[in-house]
Image (spheres, coloured by chain):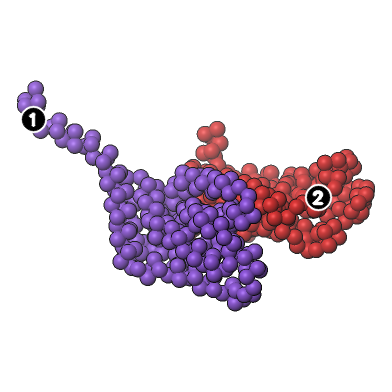
Chain colours: A purple, B red
Amino acid sequence: MAASEGALPKEVAVVHEEPRGGLAVAVWATLKRDLVLLLRRRSEVLNPLVFFAIVITLFPIGISPDPALLAAIAPGLLWVAALLAALLSLDSLFRADYDDGSLEQLLLTPQPLALLALAKVAVHWLLTGLPLALMAPVLGIMLALPAGSYLVLAVSLALGSASLSLIGAIGAALTVGLARGGVLLSLLVLPLYIPVLIFGAGAVQAAIFGDGVLAHLAILGALLALALILAPLAIAASLRISING
Amino acid sequence: MWAFINKLRSPKWFYTLSARLQPWFWAAALILIVTGTIWGLAFAPADYQQGDSFRIIYVHVPAAFLAQSIFVSLAVTGLVFMVWKIKIADMAATVMAPLGAAMTFIALFSGAVWGVPTWGTWWMWDARLTSMLILLFLYLGVIALRGAFASRDSASRAASVLAMVGVINIPIIKYSVDWWYTLHQPATFTITGRAAMPAEMWLPLLIMVLGFYSFFIALTLMRTRSEILRRESNKRWVRELAEEAH
């Protein structure tokens, strides 16, 4: 039976199989490509971290070097500075791909754009949000952050910055076609960051006061879950708008 | 239903319909706002604690209602525009956004003026004030994004997406700000007598709210009509209209 029917069924089988493997391959290829590209432009990975350190240095100079005062405001300062550092790096998230046309190729692939965009955002978080979270405890020492809250600071930033990357990517996708979208991007995205900031800084503060931290982290996780579901769809829609315009 | 949606696709049909509706809403707005203002400012009893300063409520609350409703309308018209490509929805969204921002500003400003006699300060990081301020920023973002695009179609779709993203975030922002406020500052000031407001006080308030809504609808109709003329100025029916007027 198999011998008599020849080549045709084989071709059909190939057509059926390709889209299934195609999605995983495409997501993996996007992840790998973006990782390689970003790791080759190291300064782009390092700049947000340097920015974070400089902004944190400005606060004691501008406010007061008094450790007691700094300790009281350190959770908020660290969170706001990390949030701004993550925001600054967002503008370049789709910019290079838009300029060289590879974003259009991404739109033309048969795989769902939302998932490919999610892969790009994941790389952004891996090379911006996560390093910021790991660096924050060191800057916390410099701001006299009370002991016992360092782990919570890093965990809350790691969780929260994933939401920040997802929400911010919507703004980046909306403004990627504009010549000077940088300031506009912050205008669009910052109001949407407020819930993450409240619960992120709240978690660190709760750790200092010895309250339960898990509730804050759980809410941060819930925000991330919501952003994970909804943001990729908005990012995909926004990318389509930016490419057509 | 589908026939109605198809009719909405025609700006000309909307233009003639809104011409008939508009006077009714203007009349309702005028009657309601005048009645509500006179009743609220002159005849409603003074608050036993706040005295006459509570009368700011007759501007403050309707503006705050409208500020929130208009953002929801922006998201709804944005969805309608994105799904059915109905241009009227986008024209309405274009003219509603500045109106919503203005209402948010009025609510914030009247709140600040009200804060001086009741709280003794122009600004407090009160949960409601803070969420209103964030709402104002969201409005400004939508307006700025629409203005940033060279192509009108891209601008319309981008503003629609942002309005929908914003409307999903508004409840999250609202609840997180409430939560933040209770954590940072115990509620020292509560507006007394809100639940137990006598009818002579809340009836004029209701009239003012209805008046503000009528005013919003009338103004939106009027401005959407001029937006139709601006965008369809090269269509034949608009040119014929212009020739008739001459």
* Furthest residue in direction left, as rendered: A3
- Relative image position of residue B59 (x, y in whole percent): 79, 53
* Furthest residue in direction top, as rendered: A1
* Circle 2 residue: B190
- Relative image position of residue B78 (x, y in whole percent): 54, 48
- Relative image position of residue A239 (x, y in whole percent): 41, 54
* Circle 1 residue: A6
Which secondary structure lies at badge 1? loop
- Tell whether label 2 touches label 1 (CB within 8 Å): no
Q: CA distance from mark 1 to mark 2?
A: 82 Å
Res. A205 image quadrant:
bottom right
Res. A69 image quadrant:
bottom right
Q: Mark 1, residues whose alpha carbon is within 10 Å: few (<14), some, or many (≥20)?
A: few
Visible residue check, residue A159:
yes
Report in which chain the residue with disc 1 lies.
Answer: A
In the picture, the quarter occupied by the C terminus of chain A is bottom left
Q: Which residue sits at x=80%, y=53%?
A: B188
Visible residue check, residue B243:
no
Q: Which residue sits at x=49%, y=66%?
A: A138
**Can marks 1 and 2 be said to lie on one chain?**
no
Which is in the foreground here, disc 1 or disc 2? 2
